[in-house]
Amino acid sequence: MSQSIEVLNLRTQRDFQYVQKMETQMKGLRSKFRQIEEDRKTLLTRHFQVRAQVNTRDE
């Protein structure tokens, strides 16, 4: 009985380590996605500013 509990304990520890590792990776991905979204917003803002300047020159 104690041997099966020990095996179960080892599996639980490995599973917990896996979950912790995945959590760290997910946080990193979340951070990258946030940066991509911010970069996209910045590029869109610049695009529309340049477009507005070009349109005002043409008028």
Image (cartoon, rainbow, N blue to C red):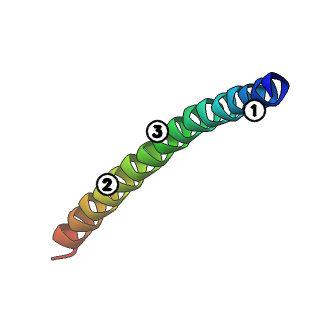
Q: Which picture quadrant has residue 52?
A: bottom left
Q: Looking at this view, is 14 or 42 the one in front? A: 14
In percent of width and height, residue 57 lies at: 20, 67
Residue 45 tag number: none
45 vs 2: above or below: below
Q: CA distance from mark 1 to mark 3?
A: 35 Å
Tell me where residue 15 sits by quadrant: top right
Given this view, does label 2 or label 1 mark the residue nearer the observer?
A: 1
Which amino acid is tagged 3? Answer: Ser
Residue found 38% across the figure and 54% down from its top: 43
Q: Nearer the viewer, mark 3 or mark 2?
A: 3
Is residue 41 shown left or right of residue 31? Answer: left
For residue 46, the mark is 2
**Residue farthest along the right direction in this orientation:** 3
Identify the amino acid type marked 2.
Answer: Arg
Q: Quadrant of the N terminus?
A: top right
Q: Marks 1 and 3: which is nearer the front? A: 1
In the picture of the structure, the residue carrying the numbered disc 1 is 8
Above or below, 23 relative to 47: above
Label 2 neighbourhood size at 10 Å, few (<14), some (14-19), many (20+)?
few
The amino acid on which the numbered mark 1 sits, given as a three-letter code, is Leu
Q: Secondary structure at mark 3?
A: helix
Using the numbered discs, state the Cα–Cα distance from disc 3 to disc 2 in whole angstroms. 23 Å
Whichever of labels 2 and 1 marks the residue nearer the N terminus, that label is 1
Judged from this view, the residue extending furthest toward the bottom is 59
The mark total stands at 3
